[in-house]
């Protein structure tokens, strides 16, 4: 049987992992597919860089475009990363009638709608399992396994670096900066950690998750994104005492006014939930469907082998339907083009949840009365309030509150007023509390 010939752009963490995995599991892959999957060409930036992966029999070039247009290549795998770097290459491959497999969430979150449209015009596949939650086959689960459901909500721990940092801040009472430095030393965080700690990477993934969950065009602009930099070890310890863990969650769900919420935020989740027990660099995605109820997908969200697992899974799918008419393939986002609908994306002010507040209050009588009066004026009721020990040499004391369910709009107004009080050293900390149904 003729092999399916693969051209890989990029031989870094994921590209190297993909070449290795295709070699290691060549026999079982051939048994699955009925044909061998053969890497015929790879493109890199620096041909002189030492590579740990075996490249015998593979043509290595610095001309990525040539791989995209090579008639001897059947499928192109884009693993160079970046948006402006990758987009022309993906277009070139699609334009040459070649299906593309990519792990590039930034590219698809920002330019996915145009790229899927273009792939559709060319009649070829554009697969992206590896772009979301690394080795966890969540795109396949949402597009295919859960197709019988109307999806109600998705809560994801979608960034291993942020989860590692929060885990270490809790177990070792580390400050954010120290946990970040440790993550960088271990190779879990980039030198520039912005994408991971500021929620951008999780947001890219959430934009794709929401599209396949709800059959909506990708809408990165509709996201509210908050990262974990403002979270202190103190917040984590206070949350722990009250029975909660703080996780960076990527959330999409139907809001109280019918819009679809789309937000990446640190959130308190009950310690006895499965999501709360996801520690370190692992990822987890909890999906609730109207028929199936709650389901949870857990696994490694990054790294050479796990991400290669997703890339190769896509390669097998794409190779099986090479040359087949588009109607025999699963639609890019799991919904027929005519069934795609732009929902109303709920603005953050519409969110309804409970809140954790940490105020830095001056240690004098009457402060708490002023705070509770402001909250009451906004119709916000308090579930629990605790005054903590003052920090050594601090002029103020932390006061921690949990509220009952309230609207974000009211919470924000109240917090503005609280932070204007002379007796509060703002800005105060506000973290949402997510009830995750199990
Ligand atoms: N790392 C992960 O665990 C992970 C997980 C999920 C998704 N992803 C996604 O997978 C993609 C790749 O990530 P990575 O971590 O593997 O990146 P990486 O280690 O930085 O590797 C990038 C590779 O692309 C090559 N390259 C860059 N621009 C090129 C160009 N114009 N022409 C030819 N080669 C070019 C580089 O060549 P040189 O080696 O010669 O410099 C390098 O081999 C990204 O979109 C990333 O978001 C990564």
Image: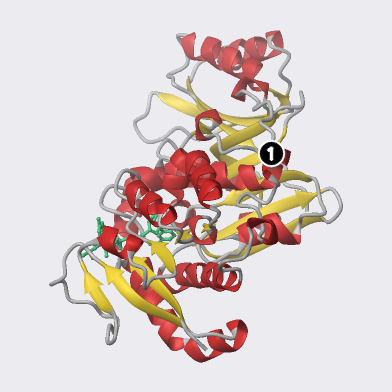
Residue in the picture at 46% in, 50% down: 105
- The picture places residue 339, in percent across and down from the top left corner, at 73, 40
Up the image or down, 393 lies above or below 73; here it is above
**Along the line of sight, the residue nearer the viewer: 361 or 283:** 283
| Residue lying furthest right | 291
Residue in the picture at 60% in, 17% down: 368
- The picture places residue 107, in percent across and down from the top left corner, at 42, 46
The colour mode here is secondary structure
> What is the total number of numbered labels drawn onto the structure image?
1
- The picture places residue 330, in percent across and down from the top left corner, at 67, 58
Task: Report if the beta carbon of the residue with label 1 is closer than 8 angstroms to ligand 1.
Answer: no
Residue 62 in which image quadrant? bottom left
Residue 187 appears in the figure? no
Q: In this image, 235 relative to 375: left or right?
A: left
- Callout 1 environment at 10 Å: few (<14), some (14 to 19), or many (20+)? some
Residue in the picture at 59% in, 86% down: 34
Residue at image mark 1: 340
**Along the line of sight, the residue nearer the viewer: 113 or 269:** 113
Secondary structure beneath dot 1 equals loop
Residue 304 in which image quadrant? bottom left
Q: In this image, 206 relative to 44: left or right?
A: right
Q: Ligand 1 falls in which quarter?
A: bottom left
Residue in the picture at 46% in, 67% down: 307
- The picture places residue 387, in percent across and down from the top left corner, at 57, 30
Residue 271 appears in the figure? yes
Q: In this image, 221 relative to 39: left or right?
A: right
**Along the line of sight, the residue nearer the viewer: 249 or 72:** 72
């Amino acid at each position: 049987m003729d092999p399916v010939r693969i051209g890989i752009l990029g031989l870094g963490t994921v590209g190297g992992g993909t070449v290795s995995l295709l070699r290691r599991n060549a026999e079982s892959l051939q048994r699955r597919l009925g044909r061998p999957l053969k890497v015929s060409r790879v493109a890199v930036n620096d041909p002189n860089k030492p590579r740990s992966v075996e490249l015998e029999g593979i043509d290595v070039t610095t001309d990525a475009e040539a791989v995209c247009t090579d008639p001897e290549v059947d499928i192109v795998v884009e693993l160079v990363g970046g948006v402006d770097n990758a987009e022309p290459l993906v277009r070139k491959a699609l334009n040459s009638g070649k299906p593309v497999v990519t792990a590039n969430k930034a590219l698809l979150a920002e330019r996915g709608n145009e790229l899927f449209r273009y792939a559709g015009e060319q009649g070829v596949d554009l697969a992206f399992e590896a772009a979301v939650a690394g080795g966890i086959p969540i795109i396949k689960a949402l597009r295919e396994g859960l197709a019988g459901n109307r999806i109600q909500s998705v809560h994801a721990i979608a960034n291993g670096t942020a989860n590692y940092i929060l885990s270490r801040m809790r177990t070792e009472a580390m400050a954010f900066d120290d946990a970040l430095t440790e993550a960088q030393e271990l190779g879990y965080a980039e030198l520039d950690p912005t994408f991971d700690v500021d929620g951008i990477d999780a947001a890219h993934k959430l934009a794709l998750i929401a599209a396949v969950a709800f059959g909506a065009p990708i809408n990165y602009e509709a996201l509210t994104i908050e990262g974990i930099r403002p979270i202190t070890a103190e917040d984590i310890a206070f949350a722990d005492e009250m029975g909660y863990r703080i996780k960076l969650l990527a959330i999409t769900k139907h809001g109280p006014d019918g819009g679809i919420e789309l937000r990446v935020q640190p959130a308190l989740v009950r310690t006895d939930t499965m999501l709360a027990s996801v520690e370190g660099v692992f990822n987890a995605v909890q999906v609730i469907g109207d028929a199936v109820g709650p389901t949870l997908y857990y696994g490694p969200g990054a790294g050479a082998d796990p991400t290669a697992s997703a890339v190769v899974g896509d390669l097998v799918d794409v190779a099986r339907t090479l040359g087949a008419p588009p109607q025999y393939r699963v639609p890019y986002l799991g919904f027929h083009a005519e069934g795609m609908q732009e929902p109303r994306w709920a603005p953050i002010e519409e969110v309804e949840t409970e809140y954790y507040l940490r105020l830095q209050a001056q240690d004098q009588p009457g402060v708490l009365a002023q705070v509770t009066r402001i909250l009451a004026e906004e119709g916000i009721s308090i579930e629990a309030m605790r005054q903590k020990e003052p920090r050594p040499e601090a002029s103020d004391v932390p006061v921690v509150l949990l509220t009952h369910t309230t609207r974000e709009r009211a919470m924000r107004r109240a917090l503005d007023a609280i932070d204007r009080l002379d007796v509060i050293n703002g800005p105060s900390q506000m973290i949402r509390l997510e009830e995750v149904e199990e």
